[in-house]
Image (tube, grey):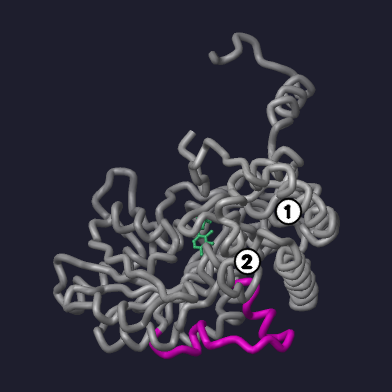
């Protein structure tokens, strides 16, 4: 493709883009179990209004846009309140879970160097921890130890303890972890980190805007947030079950001192003093303003309602899968993430990836993952209206592909191009 010689009209541009997206996942119909989380038409109107207002603005310099400084402080404040951050905690908005995690790792590395003189930093993560921790290890030169999980897919505390050493700057647990949706034993893991003088990060990218409302709804959850003493940082994604448009997450640190290890300031440039909280320089205002907008539009009531709907949908999905011979749920998911596999004893007849392909032909989108080979669902309120249709199509898809095998064995959480 080359740049058009003569510019296109608005109508031409819109038509061309519409044509481009014809093959895209049909999240608007609730048929996508991941990537886009839909809080309904009224919520769309609110975020679209905020998006139009802030589309062009830039949070690079909040002296030019004081509103964005306030918006960030408000959003971080709300997240801190939900996650029981103590007085004196601090944080920032970032572009997403990955950037929040990058910053947690960078802060842990800096703290290890400053307070413990560690020049060869290491971190310890369960194999269920998000790939972003490996990206951070790669970017920031931190050696990463990946530890097998227990049979219930939760982090194995003894095995994690055995991987910690004098160079450990960070220990990680997830609430919940992405692949099977279980919550790691955060209290025990955070205590290990505290004993080692290391940071502990709870990755609540998925759970940050779900678990607090589950607790309000009366679910019994093990402690995982700042109420656990050794937890030094938490990531929580607004653009997942916070139902904000893409590009919004929060990273919180227990104290302002810990937060200082995240940031970058530089005085020696001809362009003037440079300070930035995270990876970006120029920072789009749109994700910040739309996140603020959805938090205020939904409020505690709205999130409780959406959380209840998502969890009721999970229950129907899990029960439905359980009623289909040949399929099973992996582990015991605790929140809104469900992995589905061939039932034990059915592996020779049921190829779960072939089931996934058949579902995709019917317009349903899951991520594939392994091990074990499974189809992953991030369930949100937007899936509720169609969950019975889904279960019907799941039955039909399974019947269609029983005894056949998909040639393509690739998994596809994220792609390069
Ligand atoms: C989504 C997710 C991330 C990464 O977040 P992005 O916004 O995709 O960068 C990290 N951890 C968990 C548990 C996640 O589900």
Apparent side of residue 132 relative to residue 310 in the rendered image (left or right): left
Rendered position, 181 above or below 389: below
Where residue 316 appears, x then y in whole percent? 78, 68
Q: Secondary structure beneath disc 1?
A: helix
Does the segment drawn in magenta span residue 263? no
Q: Nearer the viewer, residue 352 or 98?
A: 352
Q: First in sequence, mark 1 or 2: give its number.
A: 1
The residue pinned by badge 1 equals 50
> In the rendered image, which quarter is residue 76 located in?
bottom right
Q: Nearer the viewer, residue 269 or 75?
A: 75
Q: Nearer the viewer, mark 1 or mark 2?
A: 2
Image quarter in which the N terminus is found: top right
Where residue 104 appears, x then y in whole percent? 38, 67
Apparent side of residue 318 relative to residue 229 in the rendered image (left or right): right
Rendered position, 198 above or below 273: below
- Judged from this view, the residue extending furthest toward the top is 5
Say if residue 265 shows up in the picture: yes
Does the segment drawn in magenta span residue 223? yes
The residue pinned by badge 2 equals 329
Where residue 244 appears, x then y in whole percent? 67, 58
Name the residue located 19 percent from the left edge and 71 percent from the top edge: 113
> In the rendered image, which quarter is residue 66 located in?
bottom right
Q: Which residues are magenta?
A: 208-230
Q: Secondary structure beneath disc 2?
A: strand
Label 2 environment density (alpha carbons within 10 Å; few <14, some 14–19, many ≥20)? many
Name the residue located 24 percent from the left edge and 79 percent from the top edge: 162
Real-space CA distance between mark 1 and mark 2, rounded to the nearest whole angstrom = 39 Å
């Amino acid at each position: 493709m080359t740049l058009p010689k003569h510019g296109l009209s608005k109508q031409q541009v819109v038509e061309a883009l519409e044509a481009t997206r014809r093959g895209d996942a049909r999240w608007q119909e609730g048929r996508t179990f991941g990537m886009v989380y839909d809080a309904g038409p009224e919520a769309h109107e609110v975020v679209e209004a905020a998006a139009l207002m802030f589309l062009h603005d830039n949070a690079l310099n909040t002296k030019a846009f004081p509103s964005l400084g306030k918006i960030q402080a408000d959003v971080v404040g709300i997240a801190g309140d939900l996650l029981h951050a103590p007085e004196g905690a601090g944080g920032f908005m970032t572009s997403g879970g990955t950037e929040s995690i990058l910053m947690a790792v960078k802060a842990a590395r800096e703290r290890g160097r400053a307070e413990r003189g560690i020049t060869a930093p290491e971190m310890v993560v369960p194999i269920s921890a998000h790939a972003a921790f490996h990206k951070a290890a790669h970017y920031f030169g931190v050696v990463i130890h990946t530890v097998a999980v227990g049979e219930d897919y939760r982090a194995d505390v003894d095995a994690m303890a055995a991987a910690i050493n004098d160079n450990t700057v960070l220990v990680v647990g997830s609430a919940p972890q992405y692949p099977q949706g279980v919550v790691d034993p955060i209290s025990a893991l955070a205590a290990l980190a505290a004993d080692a003088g290391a940071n502990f990060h709870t990755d609540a990218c998925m759970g940050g805007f779900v678990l607090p409302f589950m607790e309000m709804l009366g679910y019994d959850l093990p402690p995982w947030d700042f109420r656990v003493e050794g937890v030094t940082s938490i990531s929580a994604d607004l653009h997942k079950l916070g139902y904000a448009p893409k590009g919004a997450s929060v990273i919180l640190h227990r104290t302002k001192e810990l937060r200082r290890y995240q940031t970058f300031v530089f005085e020696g440039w001809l362009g003037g003093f440079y300070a930035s909280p995270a990876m970006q320089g120029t920072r789009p205002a749109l994700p910040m303003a739309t996140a603020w907008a959805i938090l205020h539009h939904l409020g505690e009531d709205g999130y409780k309602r959406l959380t209840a709907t998502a969890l009721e949908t999970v229950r129907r999905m899990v029960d439905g899968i359980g009623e289909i011979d040949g399929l099973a749920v992996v582990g015991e998911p605790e929140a809104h993430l469900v992995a589905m596999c061939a039932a034990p004893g059915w592996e020779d007849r049921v190829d779960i990836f072939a089931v996934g392909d058949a579902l995709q032909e019917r317009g349903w989108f899951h991520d594939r993952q392994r091990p074990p080979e499974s189809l992953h669902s991030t369930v949100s309120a937007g899936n509720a209206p169609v969950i019975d249709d889904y279960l019907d199509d799941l039955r039909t898809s399974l019947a269609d592909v029983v005894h056949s095998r998909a040639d393509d064995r690739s998994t596809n959480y994220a792609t390069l191009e």
